[in-house]
Structures are given as structure tokens and as C-alpha cells.
Image (tube, helix red, strand yellow):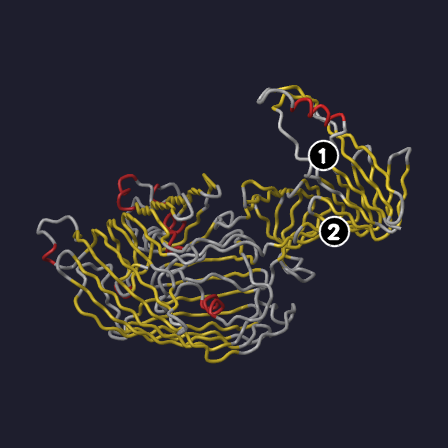
Amino acid sequence: MSILLLVTELPKLTSPVAKEIVVAQNQPPNQRVRLKQQQTSQLITQERGGERETFEIPVPGEESETEVTPIPVDSVDVVEVIADRQEYDESTQVITAEGNVVMRFAEAVMTSDRIQINLADRIAVAEGNVNLTRGEQILQGSRFEYFLVQDRGVITNARGQIDRSSLNRDLTNRLPEDRTIPDRALSDRLALSQPVTDVQAQSQFQIGIGSARDYNILQGNGDRNQGLINRVRFEADNMEFEGSDWQATNLRLTNDPFSPPELELRVDTAKYEQTEPLVNQLTTTKSRLVIDDSFTVPLLRNRFVFDRRPQSPGLFNVGFDGDERGGLFIERTWDIINREQTTWSITPQFYIQRALVPDLFGFSDEEDGGLFDPATFGIESSFNSVLSPRNSLEAEVSVTGLDVNDLEDNLRSTIAANRLIGNLNNPHSFSLEGTFRERLFNGSLGFQTVNSSIGGILTSPNISLGKTDINLQYQASIQNINANTDREEFLGSNRENDRTNLTRYQAAAFLGKSFLLWQGKTLPITRDGALRYSPFPIVPYLRLNTGVSSVASLYSSNDDQISFRGNIGIQGQFGNFSRNWFDYTGFNITYSIGTDTGESPFLFDRDEDQQTLALGINQQLYGPIRVGVQTSWNLDNGDGISTDYILEYSRRTHGITLRYNPVLEIGSFSFQINDFAWRGNPEPFEENNIRPVIQGVDR
């Protein structure tokens, strides 16, 4: 036997409240009248093939003075209950349904063994194998109490999963990468370039918690789009929810689809709520990470934000910058404004190694050291505001030392007004940009500082040329630049520095095509197969990359620098990263040769490295441990451009990466947790206002 239960939140026109509203609607327009806000819900129970009964459920309210507005009688909230057996106790006003109970309400579906509905108290209590589904979110428990009118409830012994796969990625317009300088770890770049598989789950997001800092010398065009772990599983002793918000006690949260999980977040209490449109916040107490159900790492952080924007990933970040910060340093980011369209953050920094050993990286001033010296403290600030779908404003400020006497030499800043032009699905980007003391890396010429620049830059999107699979990108800019030169004709005899001021007109175009030479097979999607040490299946492959580029720079001094370059390279990976020993080898090799006419009067954009070779290898040693090196040379003079050493500990749910570059004197320690909304740490080259110059183009 089955029953059908309907609860209507809106009164019929024959009810006392409806009559009162009809009278009120006959009053003059905008006249305020006193109404008693009590509506009568209508409950209809019906056995399939049986009789139909109607009940009135009063919903008490408060008296208030309100402006009369018509009530749409066609809008009805429905609660439906179906079960094998049912009975109604008239004295207690309780309906009991048992056997394969299905309850539909508030865009949710709940199944259970037994349910009781108290009409007087307007509460439903379900027991036995309770399973609540709302959209893609799943809650399970032994007992569920639901308040019909308020759309809130309590679940005992709760467990379930949250689907995070619908979050979108931010895309950026960047010029193509140049492999002579390593960007992210080689294993990450190979994963981005591996062939698409037939895996159904396509989305992944990341979080960095605790000490973390990753760096990127040249940010790529791609973003991670692999990933199988798209659901976050949880268990809790008790969970209360109201609408889409909830709070829980003794919560266990994991991104591992397998049990027992290799990584968990455990908290004593948790509260999940929507703070803005598309932004949710998880607030916890006594948070700790548990690895392999044995090793516990306490987290002092108790607030996690889920949205589409990059977030600060941890309590503090650890970085290494010998050129400007004296080596090892720590930092913490604080949000001043964190809204959907506008963000503003500040990041205080403390230079540990500069405080303890100030002369190690050339900071030899006797006063430049000590735990409380202003020179051992720095600060960065970042501001971003989306003014409209096409317009945005961004600004960054970095101060590498708070000594007021050296403030001008320690200050770097950038401000840019950006506009997207054309089709928003693949737009051009135009930027009016001004910089002060921008830090650039120009290959074998090393670090260069552009004292100031102001101008406009137009960057195209990736343009596919017909059906050739050839991609085109171009850039054009006009900038007034003040930077260092080694040309005596631009320098006065009684000068204070080696800078000159010129206007530069620059145009650049890049063509590239990639050929997939060979592709292997992935392993089955199991905890001991494809996902043993990786959050996504490793696809063995070989790929040939080719490209040509041309850059023309004209200067107001009547100088010019026009260069042409071609490059060819092969990259690939072997193994599936599943067995214990030597089951993964990734590599890349790129040869680049160019020719140019003329020479830039500046040092920061001079095309010095015309023939280069870049090599990289990443090798599994044992289990989750991989080691790698990425290096590049100027073949004309044999000088090394950059060498990057990498040590990785990779698991499907999390990973640790240690990187150090002795040439650039930068390094990082990165702890990455897969499949949360954060993207991980800002990279030192962007965070420290360092950008590479390749073939005379600031990328």
C-alpha cells in the first residue's frame, strides 16, 4: 500500500488568510494595512486506489504592517511521500509510513525504511538507511529529522559526498612558452600535454595547505584538466543543515575515492555556508590532516573558501630568493577585500636567512641583519577588480625591505587596466600598463630591472589556422621605457646611473604545431592501478613540437632589433607510475636557433641567446618519489642559462615538491592537496615581480 502526501505552503482563496488578503487588495494602491501573517498549509494524503484526505497545517507568524501585494496562487511547494504501508493516528496527528519510503521535497529526494510525519509540529523523522540526494550532493545517515516549513534538518551518523566538478577554470591570454627556461615541474608540463583519454571525469581543483610555495618562471597557456577525484567524501557524528548551508560535529573529509583514505581532514566542528553568490566558506575548529590513517599534521588554519578565484593556500608560505630577499623567507597572505568581483590582499614577509646570515647573498651592510632590522621585513599587496565582463583593473606592489632610507630601491609596482576585445569566448586582450622597477630575467644576461615603463599592449588569443592544427599568436605594444643601457652615447658624463629613456614600438608573431608520434595505454582506474601515485591516469606518449617566431622592435633613438627564430623539440613519458621501481620516465629536449639584425639599446630586452638547447628529465626512483632536472645552455658561448633541480613525493591525493635553482637563486617547498578549489601558491617569479624576456619580448 502506498500513500501520497502533499503539503502546500500557499493558502487557498477560501481560507481565512485568503479572505483577509482579498479585502486588503480592494484598498487604494500603496495603502499599508495591518495583516496577521499566518497562512494555512494544506496537506493531502492519498492511498493509491484508496480514499483521499485533506488536512490544514497552520503556520504561525507575526503581525506586521506591510504593503499589499497579490499572491500568485499557482506557485505551490510540494512535499511528496510514497511508501509500502501507512497509517494515521488522529489523536496525535502523526502519519507513519514504512517500507521503501521515498520523500521528495525542496528539490531533494530522501529514501528510508520508515518515516513519521507530525502534522501539529510540522516535522518529519526518517529512520533506517536514510539517503538524501539534492542535486549531485549525497547525504546518508541512520536518522533524519526534517522541519517541513523551514527547510532545515538534522542527520545522525551522517556520511556522504560533495560533487565539486562543476567549478570552472579561469583562462588567461599568454604568449607561448619557451622551453629554454623551466616553468612548472617537468612532470606537470608533460601531464598537461599528454593525449586525452576516454575517462569520463574531466575536472580537478587543488588546495595547498600549510607551508607551501611553488614557482613559475614562465606561466603556461594551459591549466590542469585531468583528474578523476571529483567528489569530496565526508563522515560526521551529527550534521544540521538549512537550505544549502550545514554544520557538523566530528567531521572527517577526504578527497580519496578509496577506503581507507590516504589523506583526511578531521575537525571537531565544521560550518559550511554561502557568503556570496558562487562563494562558500568552510569554518572549522581543531583542524588536522591525517595521512595514511597514522600521521597527523595539525592545521592552525580554520577557514577555507570555495570559489572560482585563486586563494591563499595555507597558514604561511615558504620561499627562497637569494637575489632580493637574502635566501629563505616566510610569508602569510591576509585578505582585506574578498568579494566576487573585487579582491585585495596583503602579504607580510620575513627574510629568515637575511636576518641570520646577511652577507651570504651579498647583503653585507653591517646594519642589514638581525631579527628586528627593518631590512629583514617586506610586504606585498595585490588588488584585482572585475568592472564588467570586458573590463578589469589590477595592481601589485612589492617592498623588499622596510628601511625608509632604501625604500625607493626596494619598491616595485605594476598597475594595469585591461579590456577584452571581440568574442568573449576567445578574445583579444588590450592592457594599459604602468610599471616601476619591474624585475625581468633575460637569459644569459641575468636579472635586469626596468626602472619605469608606461604604454599599451595588445595580445591575441590562440588562433587556429583552418584545419592545419597550426596555432598563431601575436602581440603589439607601444611603451615609453626607462632602463639600463651600456651604450655611452645615451649616458651623460656626470650621471648618477646607467639608465636612458626611449619609446619602443614592438610587434611579435608566433606559429606552432604539435605532432603526436605515439601513444600508449593507461591502466585500469583502481587504487593499485592508474591512481596509485597520481590523481589522473598517466598516458605514455611521444610528441614532436615545432615553432617559428619573429619579433621586431623599433626605438625612438632610430635603433632597431629584428629577430627570427625556429625551434624543434620532442617530449614524452614512459610507464604508468604504478609499480614500485622505475615505472615513470618523463623527458623533453628542445633546440632553438635564430638570427637577428640590429641590437636593442637596452639590456633587459636584448636578444642575446640565439642558439640554445634545453634538456629535462623526471624519473621515478621508488614508489611516490621522483627526481628531476631541467637545464638550458647558450650554445654559442657555452654559458648556462638556468638549471632547476626537483624532488617530488607524489600521491593521488597530495604531493610534495622541493625545487631549487642555483643560477636564479630561487627555490620552493610546495605541499599540494588535489581536488579542492584552491590553485596552490603564487609563483615567486610573478609574486616577486620577475618575468622572463625571451627574444626581446616580455612574457
Location of residue 535 with respect to 31 vertically, above or below: below
Badge 2 marks a residue whose secondary structure is strand
**How many residues crowd mark 1 within 10 Å: few (<14), some (14–19), many (20+)?**
some
| C-alpha span from label 1 to label 2 | 31 Å
Q: Which mark is residue 428?
A: none
Percent across and percent down for residue 666 are 38, 58
Query: 100 or 604, which is in the foreground?
Result: 100
Question: Under tag 1, what secondary structure?
Answer: loop
* Total marks placed: 2
In percent of width and height, residue 693 lies at 29, 61
Camera-side residue: 129 or 642? 129
Neighbor class of circle 2 (other Cα within 10 Å; few <14, some 14-19, many 20+) is many
The answer to whether residue 441 is above or below residue 36 is below
Residue 140 disc label: 2
In this orientation, which residue lies closer to the viewer: 460 or 127? 460
Q: Quadrant of residue 202?
A: bottom right
Q: Which residue is mark 1?
A: 10
Residue 384, image quadrant? top left
Tag nearer the camera, 1 or 2: 1
Marks 1 and 2, the one that precedes in the sequence: 1
Residue occupying the point 52% across, 72% down: 620
Q: Position of residue 554 (x, y in %)?
A: 18, 60
* Residue under the image location 26 percent in, 54 percent down: 449
- Left or right? Give the position of 650 relative to 253: left
Question: Which quadrant: the C terminus?
Answer: bottom left
- Residue at 89% x, 34% y: name it: 92
In which quarter of the view is residue 258 placed? bottom right
**Pointer 1 with pointer 2, Cβ within 8 A:** no
Front position in the image: 411 or 93 = 93
**Amino acid carrying mark 2 in the image:** Gln
Q: Amino acid type of disc 1?
A: Leu
